[in-house]
Image (cartoon, helix red, strand yellow):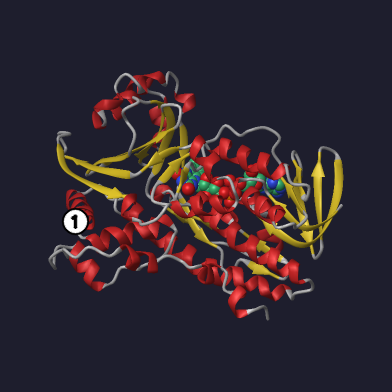
């Protein structure tokens, strides 16, 4: 078999890249080892930049139709006796323009949409139930059942998630950071009126609730590592009570979970590959970086990688015979952006990692000031949206810490838009030309 680009792994990253390349007329084969939909939970929150990318791919309306819009994240801090001590809001609507909301979409439905759309294009080929075994220079060895096949390509992209064959073929080792907590995660029915994201915490507990379409809600509940086994021996009513203590509105709904079997353990990790590109190979998504789920970024980083790499490879092939060293543009654009999101998610994770009352106090003060100071609020939403980066400076930190007064000044919409990545920021080779 022969193609322009072979993508190893048909998750969200691989499929977004496959669709993008096929739309640009590139011949692409996506190789995916699974045949059936996995039952395990994966990312569901689409940030604004991902929506902009899907718009460019012509599937914005379909994603919106399958998604639940989230405009606001409601952060509630409770006392030990579970009374409301503080409430603050993080509002996507401070972002000017069309992409000023997040969307919750069932992970497998999004994959299905990407695959169905790509399959309508004649350049796109999908090999399901086929595992990539090794990649050498211009040939990959793949296995489907007992059959072994060779795929020849100009470029190979590793989109296999955390255990990446391509990353291995590139001779790379990663160093993983673990956290002092795990999560339980499960979705269940919700009241129709529960429509915005909510994070509820006490000094030693954390529950995140994110409405899904079809009147479902995704939940994540923080537990100490090792507690999962012990918890599972308790009656399921114990789990229900953990939720209804913190979120009385879930009473009557969380009880629809009748068995611990539906509840998944999620172990957060963080790593960043030292490089993304070697010769004619590149890695995207979780193959390149894993991020703590607190800021809902993992899937979005995979989509954003796919967008930049797809545009670059399509431009390189369109010019014919361009040096593979130009793949370096992908790393140049994405590495520092990914590093920023990894740090941002890590900090958000630390804010909930320590069960001490002073930490809870600092957290609420930081969130309150972030909501009240228009510049801090915009910076926070911009940075998580993926639409741009505006780093916090010393003054911001002082304001957050209560050492300086909050600013009253609101930012003009035009000024905010200047902070968005421009097409030149996203695709610098179009301006600079290839090497
Ligand atoms: C429990 C959990 C919760 C998460 N929560 C969130 C969240 O709230 N928000 C968010 O944005 N992100 C979240 N994430 C992260 C998000 O799901 C991932 O970042 C995202 O799925 C990465 O996409 P990907 O395409 O890079 O990799 P994956 O989704 O892992 O896809 C990789 C694909 O490659 C296939 N594959 C692997 N090896 C081979 C091989 N050798 N040959 C062929 N195919 C292969 C796999 O079967 C899989 O289909 C979560 C992840 C987990 C595990």
> Does residue 155 lie above or below 196 as drawn?
below
Q: Position of residue 249 (x, y in %)?
A: 27, 26
Q: Position of residue 346 (x, y in %)?
A: 38, 57
The C terminus is located in which quarter?
bottom right
> Does residue 146 lie above or below 400 as drawn?
above
The quadrant in which residue 59 appears is top right
Q: Position of residue 297 (x, y in %)?
A: 45, 52
Is 184 left or right of 308, judged from the image as shown?
left
> Does residue 264 lie above or below 189 as drawn?
below
Q: Nearer the viewer, residue 192 or 235?
A: 192
Q: Position of residue 381 (x, y in %)?
A: 34, 56
Number of disc labels = 1
Instruction: Answer yes or no: is residue 428 visible.
Output: yes
Q: Circle 1 is placed at which residue position? A: 372
Residue drawn at point x = 34 percent, y = 34 percent: 195
Q: Nearer the viewer, residue 152 or 267?
A: 152
Residue drawn at point x = 30 percent, y = 29 percent: 242
Query: Mark 1 Cα within 10 Å, few/some/many (few <14, many 20+)?
Result: some
Secondary structure beneath dot 1 equals helix
Instruction: Answer yes or no: is residue 170 visible.
Output: no
Q: Would the CB of label 1 be found within 8 Å of ligand 1?
A: no
Is 132 left or right of 292, judged from the image as shown?
right
Q: Nearer the viewer, residue 403 or 175?
A: 403
Is 175 left or right of 347, judged from the image as shown?
right
The quadrant in which residue 258 appears is top left
The quadrant in which residue 255 appears is top left
């Amino acid at each position: 078999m022969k193609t322009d680009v072979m993508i190893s792994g048909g998750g969200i990253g691989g499929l977004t890249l496959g669709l993008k390349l096929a739309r640009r007329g590139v011949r692409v084969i996506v190789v995916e080892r699974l045949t059936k939909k996995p039952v395990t939970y994966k990312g569901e929150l689409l940030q604004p930049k991902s929506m902009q990318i899907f718009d460019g791919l012509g599937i914005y309306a379909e994603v919106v139709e399958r998604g639940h819009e989230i405009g606001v994240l409601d952060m509630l801090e409770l006392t030990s006796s579970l009374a409301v001590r503080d409430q603050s809001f993080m509002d996507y609507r401070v972002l000017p323009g069309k992409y000023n909301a997040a969307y919750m979409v069932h992970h497998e439905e999004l994959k299905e949409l990407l695959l169905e759309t790509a399959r309508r294009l004649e350049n796109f080929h999908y090999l399901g139930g086929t595992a990539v075994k090794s990649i050498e220079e211009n040939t990959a060895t793949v296995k489907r059942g007992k059959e072994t096949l060779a795929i020849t390509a100009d470029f190979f992209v590793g989109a296999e998630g955390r255990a990446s064959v391509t990353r291995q073929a590139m001779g790379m080792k990663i160093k993983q950071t673990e956290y002092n907590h795990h999560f339980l995660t499960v979705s269940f029915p919700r009241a129709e009126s529960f429509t915005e994201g909510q994070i509820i915490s006490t000094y030693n507990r954390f529950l995140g609730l994110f409405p899904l379409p079809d009147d479902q809600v995704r939940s994540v509940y923080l537990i100490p590592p090792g507690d999962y086994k012990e918890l599972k021996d308790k009656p399921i009513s114990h789990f229900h009570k953990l939720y209804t203590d913190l979120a009385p509105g879930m009473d009557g709904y969380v009880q629809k979970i009748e068995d611990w079997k539906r509840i998944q353990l999620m172990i957060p990790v963080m790593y960043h590959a030292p490089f993304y590109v070697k010769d004619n190979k590149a890695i995207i998504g979780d193959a390149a970086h894993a991020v703590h789920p607190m800021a809902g970024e993992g899937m979005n980083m995979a989509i954003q990688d796919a967008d930049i790499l797809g545009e670059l490879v399509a431009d390189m092939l369109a010019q014919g015979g361009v040096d593979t060293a130009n793949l370096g543009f992908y790393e140049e654009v994405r590495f520092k952006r990914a590093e920023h999101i990894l740090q941002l998610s890590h900090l958000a994770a630390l804010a909930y990692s320590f069960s001490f009352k002073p930490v809870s106090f600092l957290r609420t003060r930081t969130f309150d000031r972030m909501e009240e100071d228009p510049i801090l609020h915009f910076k926070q939403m911009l940075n998580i949206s993926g639409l741009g980066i505006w780093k916090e400076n010393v003054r911001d930190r002082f304001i957050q810490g209560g050492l300086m007064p909050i600013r009253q000044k609101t930012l003009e919409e035009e000024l905010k838009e200047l902070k968005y990545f421009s097409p030149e920021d996203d695709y610098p080779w179009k301006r600079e030309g290839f090497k």
